[in-house]
Each structure stands twice: as structure tokens, then as C-alpha cells.
Image (cartoon, grey):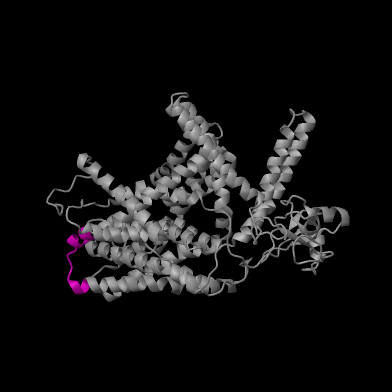
Amino acid sequence: MPRRDGRSRPVPGEVGVESHSDVLLLVVGVAAAYGLARRVGVLPPLLLTVVGVVVSYVPGVPDYHLEPEVVLALFLPPLLYSAAISTSLPSFKRNLRPIALLAVGLVVFTTLSVGFVLHWVLPEIPLAAALALGAVVAPPDAVAATAVARQTGLPRRLVSLLEGESLVNDATALTILSVASAAIVDPGTPGPVDVAWEFLVASVGGVVVGVAVAYAIALVRRHVDEPLMSSTLSLVTPFAAWALAEEIHSSGVLAVVVAGLILGHKSPQLLSAEARLQQRAIWETVEFLLQGVLFALVGLQLPFLVEQLDEDLSTVVTATLVVVGVVLLARPVWVFPATYLTRLVPRVRHNDPPPTPKVPAVISWAGMRGAVSLAAALSLEEETPHRELLVFVTFVVIAVTLVGQGATLPMLIRRLRIEGPDPVQDALQEASVKQDAVRAAEEALDRLVAEHPLPHGVEERLRQGADHRAMAAWERLGAGGGAHAPGEEAVETPSEAYRRVRHAMLVAERDVLVKARDEGRIDDEVMQAVLRDLDLEETLLSGVDERRGGRRQESTVLMDACEHLATAPADAVPSTTQGCEDCLREGTAWVHLRLCLGCGHVGCCDSSPRRHATKHWQTDAHPVIRSFEPGEDWRWCYADEVVS
């Protein structure tokens, strides 16, 4: 059909200069809208969709058309894979039951609710077509759910549920859609048994293909040392899993998700450090571009969908109100009973207490639809009754859920006072596991030194580096800031000072490299090689800075309590509240304070110059200390090296 600017619509697959400029304009617009969203604090998918709708009516803007085959075969696999490799496989397994209730049970419930209610209100719409629409609008969008969950500071279990649901629900919806589409073409062919059998075949086949592709890629990666080749394999993986699954008429969605979960979980063993850094950067870029383009294209479709609509106004309004209402209502109607009633079923293990109503309330409102739903609607056969109406209603559902729920979900989370992950507890876990890691590293160093003595000074440098990494994690636990001395305000901790000065040193080193390159004293390739090492070190320093700070929440046990921790009192009367008593007597500075639960001695931590808390343990043999910093109650056993 002709475009709004009078030019004919390009033939699918045709590429020309005009198409190239249109793509460039779209990508630049997405980048600008994304930057604006980050600046004003709006979720990028929401703003991109709204901007797409507004821009679509600006004269002279190219008439972009969303091809369903491109979305389902080109956009969806890498987006699902990118989300899957960053999803915790152990967490996915632990939450498999609630994820299945959302990704399978809720999708089926929503599909049936939309289909039967719409057919009942508007009998002229056949039941098969109404059920097809139900399958189209049933699954929340993986991209939108991930963006909202990660940016609104939800607890990790809630994030895992929403991410797990969004990764799997497309498989359920697309399977139901294929059955409903077959019923439209040949009414009465598929029955309930046929639907169940097709779903089983698609699910099992998708899982098998995903496992096979993951282990095949893992086998190849064991023989690939080049980071560039490893990244190429990573980019090929989702398309290979999708194509192979679709070839045997199984679920490409499940194949991609399963492969991504396995390979993401195995990446520490399969990939080198350089390959992991490179892969993370590549997938972040791919995800950013594809997400932005998809949501912008959703908004840009509105004029095209309106032009295609050929229904009377009352039918359009009725269908739209019915479907939007059922979609919004079906989720809480399913989520609340599924959260609590399943706990009444005998023989079903529940390792956690029932959640408060806040949790199902947030899950109920986190039902944003996205580009996959629109692509699925556009993929409906041309002979589908009221096809243009179904596509238009799908767009409205996407707009209402994405803009309405996406814009208000952060406010709902704040009103319900749902706390996200506790940074203090994260730092405590990091400090504890780093203590174990450093101990293992020192044991390896002792063994290697015993086998073959090292050159002078090397062993000392290695031990200092390991000690610095462990102490840096413990220093971040101090709520009161940096080091203290009698009569002085808080100053930097040793690790903070190290990061600040090392940053400045790296800048100076980089300036020398660039100057030498510009003056022709070194080749550009030499500069790039040295610069890469400096950049890796600066990336590590920046990563530490980003994890600092946060709010204090109730303490939780991180490791199995030892006998000393089990019998030690929860608190003790401090010998002084002024600071480290030994530092006060000696006139030296301290970083953080520790309270001996055996006698109330207040000493300084191991990041402090004098390490009086450890010296007190060595001389008085009181094994358990507690943090004496404001807002902290974690305890440490020197004897068993256990934290709680």
C-alpha cells in the first residue's frame, strides 16, 4: 500500500539507500530517546513507545513497518538469549514451580478468559479467532519485565520470578497461537487432546534442543582460546538453537532459553576472563539496540494499524474495552490464588514462608506487553476473521499495559515499601566469600613456594595483593566512613585512598601513552596493547566503586553458625564508646571498629594499621567479635573463620 508521504511501500527484503537512511534515523532516534529516559528517570521501553507514537504522525517521518517474521526469527532469539545468560540457573530451578504457574498456567488462563469473554460479548468474532487474540496478548514482554524489574529495585526473588516468567511464557503463547490459527483455517480440527499433545511435543523438543545446543557449544568452546571466536560462537548460539528447534516443529523460545541458562551458568568454566568481558559488552550493546528498535517500532505502527482498520466504531470500542479489561483483571485473579492456595496442596514442599500480599500485588501489576505480542498478531493469517481489529486491539493492550502499568509500577513499589536487595548484606557476603577465596589462594601460594622458590620480593607482592582484595571488601561494610584518629574527622579508608590515587596514576599513564603515539615514538598498535591493560585495571576499580554504599536492612545468617557463634552472646558492654581503646592509648588511627563479645574490648579492624581486634583474639583467645559500626550487627569467629 502507498506510504503517507506518497511513496510506495518497499518490497519486503528490498534494501536501498533510502532504507539505509531510514534505519540510521531509527537507531539515532532510539539512542536519543534512551538517553533522555535515563536522564529524566523514565523506563526506556515506556518512553520509546510513546515517542514512537508521537513521531509516527510527524510529516516526513518514514513509514516503518514491523515484519512479524523478522521480530520472531531475528529479534526474539538474541533478546531471549541475552536475558537467559544473565539469569541465575540455580534461582530459576528454585523458583520453577511459581515460574511454571505464571508462564504456563497464567498464559492459558488469560488466553481462555480473553477468548471466551470476547466471543460471548461479540458473537460475530469466532471463538478460534478470539482465542488466537487471547494467546497473542497473554504473555508479558520479556524485555519490558526485565527492564522494570532491574530498575525498580525489587527483591531478587521477585526479579527471578518475573524474568523466569517472561523467558518461558512466549513458548506457551506461541504454541497456543499455532493451534488456534489452525482451527481458524480448518474449524474443529484440533481438540483438547491435540492441543495438549502439541504443547508437550513443543516443550520437550525445545528443552532437548536447548540442552543439545548448549553442550555442543560448550564442547567447541573448550577448544577455542580466541575471545573473538568465543564471542562469535555466542552470537550464533541463539539463532542455531531457534532454527534447529523450529526445524523439528518444537519451541524455539524454550530452546534458546535453555541453551542460554546452561551456557550462562557454565561461563566461568568455559570462558576466559577476556572472553567474558568481551561477551558481556557485546550482549549489552545488542540488547540495547534491539530493545530500543523494537519498542520504537511498536509506537511507529499506530498510523498503519489505524489505516488498516475497517470496523464500525462501536465494535472497535467494545472489543478494545473488553480485552483490555480482561487482560488487566485476569492476572491478579490468577496470581493471588496461585500464590496461596497451592501451599495447601499436600506433598508440595515449600522452603520459604508465605509471602505478604505485597508480593502478588506487584506481580499482578507487572504485566507489560510488548513487541512480541504485536508481531504475533501481525503473523495471523490474512483469512483470519476481523484480523485488522485483532491487531489494533493488540496494540491498545500493549500501549495500556506498557504505559499505564510501566509508569505506575515504580510508584506502587514505593507505596508498598518493598525493599530491594540490601547492599550491606551483599557486601558482607562478598567479604565472607573473598576471605575464603584469599585463604585458598594463600594455600596455593604456600604449595607453589614449597615446590619452587620464587624470585626475591615476588611472594611478598602476591601476599599483599591477596590481603588488599580481602580487606577492601571488609572496609565497605563500615557505615561510619573512613579511618579515624583522636580529634580528627573521618578520612579515607586505605582501599578508598588506593582507588583514588590509582585512578589518577592510570590517567597519567594513559596521557603519556597518547602523547608518545601522537609524537610518533610508538606505533598505535603498541599503544592499544598497553592501553588495554590499563583499561582492564580501571574497569576493576570502577566496579568496586559502583558496589559501595546502600541502606541497612535486617541481618541474615550467611553461613552455617559455628559452635562459638552459637554460644556467644548477641552483644556485650563496650569498654569504651570513643573508638579503639588501644589506638586511643597509642595515639594511632583506625578504620573500623570491632567489639569483643567475650569481654567488651573495642579494637580496630584488620584494615587499620595496628589490627588491635585480631591482636586481642591472639592474646586473650576470645573468638567472637561483632561489628561496632552504626547499623551493623554481623559477627565473626576468628577460630572457625565464619561470619553470621
The answer to which of 197 and 31 lies nearer the viewer is 31
Which percent across, then down, holds residue 38? 40, 57
Outermost residue toward the front in this view:
487
Q: Which residues are magenta?
A: 301-315
Task: Please indicate whether residue 219 sits to the left or right of residue 474 in the image.
Answer: left
In the picture, which quadrant includes the C terminus?
Answer: bottom right
Examine the rendering and report whether any part of residue 514 can be seen. yes
Q: Is residue 256 above or below residue 361?
A: above
Which percent across, then down, holds residue 620? 88, 57
The answer to which of 569 and 605 lies nearer the viewer is 605
Task: Please indicate whether residue 195 sits to the left or right of residue 383 in the image.
Answer: right
Which percent across, then down, holds residue 642? 75, 56
Image point (45%, 24%), residue name = 523
Examine the rendering and report whether any part of residue 293 can be seen. no
Q: Is residue 230 above or below residue 392?
A: above
**Residue 487 lies in quadrant:** bottom right
Which percent across, then down, holds residue 202? 43, 52
Task: Please indicate whether residue 10 sits to the left or right of residue 455 in the image.
Answer: left
Secondary structure mostly seen in the magenta stretch: helix
Outermost residue toward the left in this view:
6
309 in the magenta segment: yes
Task: Please indicate whether residue 363 sits to the left or right of residue 39 in the image.
Answer: right
The answer to which of 426 and 316 lies nearer the viewer is 426
The answer to which of 495 and 489 lies nearer the viewer is 489
Image point (81%, 62%), residue name = 601
291 in the magenta segment: no
